[in-house]
Amino acid sequence: MFYGLALLTCLSAWAIVLSQNIIRMSVYLLLTLGGVAGMYMMLNAELLAAVQLIVYVGGILILIVFGIMLTSKNPYMQLRADAWEMMLGVAIAVSIAGLLILSMVHSPISTVSQPGGLGGGYDHVAAVGRALLSAYVIPFEVAAVLLLVVMIGAAFMARQRAK
């Protein structure tokens, strides 16, 4: 199951890179983020999976789609890259892949599951919820206000274009 989710994630991420339609890119991004959430579930990191689905799939991806649909004259526009842009992208991707492989090979983290959870003092979802709504309530609210301002700005820009 894990390898199936990893394959889905990799193939949909590759489809994002190859696609030229921005709406299709959003759908492929949905599949990629969903595959990552599924892998988190397989690794017994339920909190990370829930955050992945709620924040990224439920929030950011919807914000991207609404932003595209509200502000773009043609949301189905085609995106084309020049040859030098493609070569630069390939060079950056190969560099990042090399760094990731190098860091995985030299990582001191054991691959054996630890009985105490992920560490850092947040072993349970309830503890993370308490910390989020007590010690980290200000950054949480700032992020919520920022997303609200972005949505209002997108609606305002769309309204200005309509006039």
Image (spheres, helix red, strand yellow):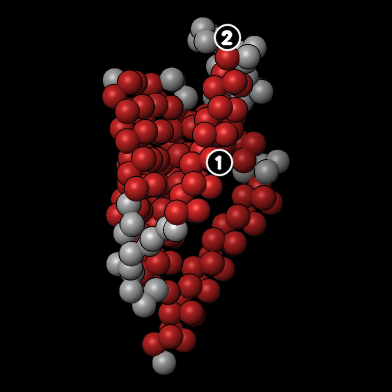
How many numbered dots are placed on residues in this image? 2
Position of residue 31 measured from the top left corner of the image (x, y, whole percent): 32, 41
| Foreground pick, 82 / 62 | 82
Vertical comparison of 44 with 112: above or below? below
Vertical comparison of 43 with 70: above or below? above
- Which numbered marker is on residue 92? 1
- Please report the residue visible at 55 percent of the width from the left and 41 percent of the height from the top: 92
Q: Quadrant of the C terminus?
A: bottom left
- Please report the residue visible at 62 percent of the width from the left and 40 percent of the height from the top: 132
Circle 1 crowding by C-alpha within 10 Å: few under 14, some 14–19, many from 20:
few
| Residue type highlighted by circle 1 | Ile
Left or right of 119 on screen, residue 27? left
Q: Quadrant of residue 40?
A: top left
| Residue type highlighted by circle 2 | Ser
- Which numbered marker is on residue 110? 2
Residue 55 appears in the figure: no
| Foreground pick, 112 / 81 | 81
Give the CA separation, mark 1 to mark 2: 29 Å
